[in-house]
Image (cartoon, rainbow, N blue to C red):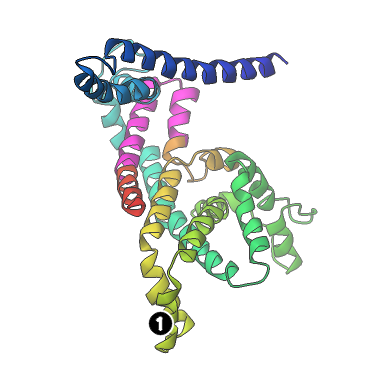
C-alpha cells in the first residue's frame, strides 16, 4: 500500500510540478520582457529566444544528471583500483587486453552481432511479407509479436526448460531432449556444448526480436506505393522479383534502422546469458563480465573499464541509427 501511495504521489508531483514550472517560468519571462509598450518588438524577440531553453531546461538538467554524470563517473572509476582509493591510470585497460575472459566476451559478442540482428531482421521481413498476404495474418502477427511482451529473464527461464537435461533413462522434461529421445537419440546437456551453446542462447533473442522487426517492416511494406508494384507486375515481374527488386530496395532504410536497433540490444545482452549459463562453458559476454567484476568481485575499477569499452562499442552504432532515423523522417 505504501508503494502504491508513493507511486501515485510521485505521478501527481511530477505532473503538477511540470505544469507549475512551465506556467511559472512563462509568467516570469513575460514580466521581464512584457509583450507590450514601446519595446514590445524587442521584448518578444528576446523572450522567443529564451522560452525554448526554459522549457527544455529541466529535461537537459535531468539528462545530464542521469546520462552524462554516470559516463564521467564510470570513466573516473575505471582509472582507479578496486575500491577507488588509488589512481592506477590505464592499468585496468591494460589488464583487459590480457584477460582471457575479456577476449572470450569480445569474441562471443561479435558472434552475437553477426548472427542475431541478421536472423531477426530476416525472419521479421519474411514474417511481415507472409502475414500481410494470408487471411489469418493478424493472428499470426500476434503470435510472433507475443515474445516481445516477455522480459529477457522470463524468456531465458522458458528456454532453459526447453534445453533442460535429465540423465539417460529418466523422463526428459526438456522439450528438445524429449524430441531427441523419442527419435531414439541420447539426451544432451545442450547449454554446455561448446561452441553450439552460444547459438542456443542466441535463438532466445532472435525469438524475441523477430516480432519487433516484423511490426516495423510490415508498416514499411504497407507504405510502398501500389503503383510501383502494379507497374512491375504489368512488366511481367515474378513475385520473387517484385519482393527482392521492388519492395526490399524501397524499405532498405527501415531495414537498416531495424538492424541497428537490434544490434544495440545485442551489444547490451546480459539477462539471457545470466539466467541460462551465467557466462559458463564459453558463453561469457561483456555485460555479464562487467556484472561479475563489479558486483561479485567488488572491483569497481575493472567493472567500470568494461562498461567504458561497451559504451564505446555501442555509441557509433547509436549515432548511425539516429542519422538513419532522421533520414527516414524526412
Q: Position of residue 121 (x, y in %)?
A: 46, 59
Report x, y in % for residue 211: 56, 55
User: Splitting the image into 4 quarters, where does residue 299 fall?
Assistant: top left
- Predominant SS of the magenta segment: helix
Looking at the image, which residue sits at the far front?
A: 38
Q: What residue is rendered at 32% in x and 26% in y?
A: 52
91 part of magenta stretch: no
Q: Measuring 40% from the left and 42% from the top, which residue is drawn there?
A: 105
Q: Position of residue 53 (x, y in %)?
A: 30, 23
Query: Vertical placement of 180 versus 281: above or below?
Result: below
Label 1: how many Cα within 10 Å (few below 14, some 14–19, many 20+): few
Furthest-bottom residue in this view? 236
Q: In the figure, residue 249 lies in which quadrant?
A: bottom left
Instruction: Reply above or below: 300 against 123.
Output: above
Is 68 left or right of 186, judged from the image as shown? left
In front here: 195 or 70? 70
Task: Work out whether residue 54 can be spotted.
Answer: yes
Name the residue at 19% across, 20% down: 42
Quarter the N terminus occupies? top right
Residue 70 shows in the view: no
Find residue 272 and report its horizontal and vertical position in percent.
55, 42
- Residue 205 vs residue 309: left or right? right
Q: Label 1: which residue?
A: 231
Residue name at image x 64 percent, y 41 percent: 154
Give the residues in magenta: 288-317
Q: Is residue 14 left or right of residue 61?
A: right
Asked if the stretch drawn in magenta spans residue 292, the answer is yes
Q: Judging from the image, what secondary structure is the residue with disc 1 in?
A: helix
Q: Quadrant of residue 210?
A: bottom right
- Closest to the observer, 202 or 5: 5
Amino acid at each position: 500500500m505504501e508503494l502504491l501511495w508513493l507511486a501515485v504521489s510521485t505521478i501527481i508531483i511530477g505532473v503538477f510540478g511540470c505544469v507549475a514550472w512551465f506556467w511559472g517560468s512563462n509568467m516570469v519571462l513575460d514580466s521581464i520582457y512584457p509583450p507590450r509598450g514601446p519595446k514590445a518588438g524587442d521584448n518578444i524577440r528576446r523572450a522567443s529566444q529564451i522560452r525554448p531553453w526554459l522549457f527544455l531546461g529541466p529535461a537537459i538538467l535531468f539528462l545530464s544528471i542521469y546520462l552524462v554524470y554516470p559516463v564521467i563517473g564510470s570513466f573516473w572509476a575505471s582509472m582507479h583500483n578496486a575500491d577507488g582509493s588509488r589512481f592506477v591510470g590505464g592499468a585496468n585497460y591494460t589488464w583487459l587486453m590480457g584477460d582471457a575472459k575479456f577476449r572470450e566476451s569480445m569474441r562471443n559478442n561479435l558472434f552475437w552481432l553477426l548472427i542475431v540482428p541478421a536472423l531477426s531482421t530476416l525472419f521479421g521481413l519474411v514474417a511481415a511479407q507472409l502475414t500481410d498476404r494470408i487471411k489469418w495474418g493478424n493472428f499470426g502477427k500476434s503470435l510472433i509479436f507475443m515474445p516481445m511482451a516477455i522480459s529477457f529473464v522470463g524468456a531465458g527461464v522458458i528456454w532453459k526448460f526447453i534445453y533442460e537435461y535429465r540423465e539417460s533413462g529418466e523422463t526428459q522434461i526438456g522439450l528438445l531432449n524429449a524430441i531427441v529421445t523419442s527419435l531414439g537419440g541420447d539426451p544432451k546437456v545442450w547449454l554446455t556444448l561448446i561452441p553450439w551453446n552460444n547459438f542456443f542462447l542466441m535463438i532466445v533473442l532472435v525469438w524475441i526480436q523477430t516480432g519487433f522487426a516484423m511490426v516495423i517492416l510490415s508498416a514499411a511494406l504497407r507504405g510502398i506505393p501500389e503503383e510501383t508494384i502494379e507497374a512491375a507486375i504489368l512488366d511481367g515481374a515474378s513475385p520473387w522479383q517484385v519482393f527482392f527488386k521492388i519492395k526490399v530496395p524501397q524499405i532498405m532504410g527501415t531495414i537498416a534502422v531495424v538492424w541497428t536497433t537490434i544490434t544495440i540490444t545485442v551489444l547490451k545482452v546480459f539477462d539471457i546469458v545470466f539466467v541460462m549459463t551465467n557466462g559458463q562453458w564459453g558463453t561469457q559476454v561483456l555485460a555479464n563480465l562487467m556484472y561479475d567484476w563489479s558486483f561479485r568481485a567488488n572491483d569497481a575499477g575493472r567493472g567500470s573499464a568494461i562498461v567504458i569499452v561497451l559504451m564505446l562499442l555501442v555509441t557509433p552504432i547509436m549515432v548511425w541509427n539516429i542519422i538513419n532515423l532522421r533520414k527516414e523522417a524526412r
